[in-house]
Image: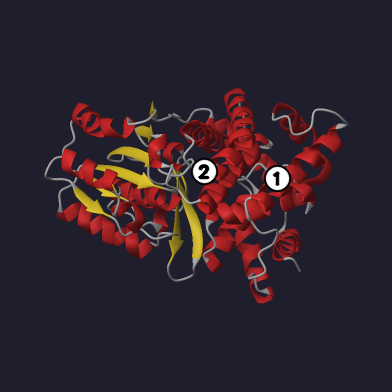
Amino acid sequence: MGLKKAYCRVYQWIYNIGMKVVKWKEPERLEGVDSFHSIPEILEQAGVWAPMIVTGPRIGKTGFLKDLYNDLSERSVIYDQVHPDPTISQIEEMYQIYQDHDCDSIIAIGGGSNMDAAKALAARVARPDKSLQDMKGQLKVGRQVPFFVAVPTTAGTGSETTIAAVVTDDAENHKYAINDPVLVPDYAVMDPSLTVSLPADITAATGMDALTHAVEAYLSWTYRTEETIEYCEEAVTAIMGFLPEAYEQGDSLEAREEMLIASFKAGAAFTRACVGNVHAIAHTIGGLYHVPHGLANAVVLPIVLEDYGSAVYGKLARLATLSQVACEGSEAERAKEFIRHIRQMNEHMGIPEHLPQIREEDIAQMAEWADQEANPLYPVPVIYDKKHFEEVIRKVAGK
């Protein structure tokens, strides 16, 4: 483990030097009630006329989507069959439709799955010479994607500002990410009125997803910057304050807007500072058992934070103080209170403490996948090997 840890840290140090010369961008932000209606004007200013709208069946039936479609040019087309954990075969179907209709831009509307599908589509359009498998990993798209507008209808994934498209390999039921700065959308339209109808359970899971992004980016060993630190602190503070209100009072536009902004900041932070072992484990759970990503993150987060122990006490203690979860006591006491508060939030919102559907016979494979995802890239405070991943996954399963 000593040699592996040294290799990972050297890799991360070198990778961080490389990231300093990468051209990073954030989407232009449109915020506030009814900002959704500005999309036709955005497309006109960009000089595009044939957008493909990428969304899922639930949003496909909404009145606001029909209004948007009516306001766009007659060359626009809707694909509203994105399902959770979009697969490579579905992306290829979308790519064929995009080509058949001579589309020139993409509008992604919805949660993380819809955004992932749209980004993967954008990658295929940019690189028709490459398969999605060929673009797995870091910086393998490398060409400009079509003009891209992202409209989140959940406050959690932060996909409207990230470089990642997470897809599922049909053959192996295994999730992986395509990461490239060119996948960051040009615009993020954050209209809280589109999130007020979100069911309470999805509000909870996506909100905890945003919290996981902010916390893991904050714990980044190498890649974090002054900006990501500020974004993480602001996001954690807002989520701790407004997620319970958004969960309990779904029609609170203030809480919904604060959660959208927090999700955006958390997404921007982890785009630069990266995520960690929570995500590495959650991706394997989603791929094998089709557990929603936010729910998996919510369950795994306090277990991994507790496992990290004293390696994260200082940073968690600061988050506890900033979010007024715990303002007194030692670093260890405040950090432990922060973790307890996460568990209390989960319990209040009906999120389980464990995921007992995880099968013992799958754990070795899950640990291998998690190890491959996390190492050497993720700048985690504690580097796990496969054995350590197995131990933590068993805790997640409640074994």
* Residue found at the far left of this picture: 74
From the image, which quarter does the C terminus lie in? bottom right
Which element type, helix, strand or loop, lies under badge 1? helix
Secondary structure under badge 2?
loop
Q: Which label belongs to residue 342?
A: 1
Place of residue 176 in the rendered image (x, y in percent of width and height, measured from the top left): 50, 56
Say which quarter of the image contains residue 214.
top right
Q: According to the image, label 2 marks what residue?
A: 156
For the residues marked 1 and 2, what is the alpha-carbon distance in whole angstroms?
15 Å
Q: Residue 255 location in percent, x, y?
A: 52, 34
Q: Which residue is located at x 27 percent, y 33 percent?
A: 37
Q: Report the quarter where the N terminus lies.
A: bottom right
Q: Is residue 156 left or right of residue 307?
A: left
Residue 50: where, in percent of width, then height? 17, 42
Establish if 332 lies above or below 288: above
How busy is the neighbourhood of tag 2: few (under 14 within 10 Å), some, or many (20 plus)? many
Residue 113 in percent (x, y) is at 42, 53
Q: Count the marks: how many?
A: 2
Front in this rendered view, residue 88 or 250: 250
The residue at the far right in this view is: 330
Q: Relative to 276, is 332 on the left or the right?
A: right
**Amino acid type assigned to the residue bearing label 1 in the image:** Ile
Q: Is residue 43 visible?
A: yes
**395, above or below 37, in the image:** below
Instruction: Tell me which numbered mark, 1 or 2, is placed earlier along the sequence.
Output: 2
Q: Please say whether residue 375 is visible from this viewpoint.
A: no
Most foreground residue, 368 or 111: 111
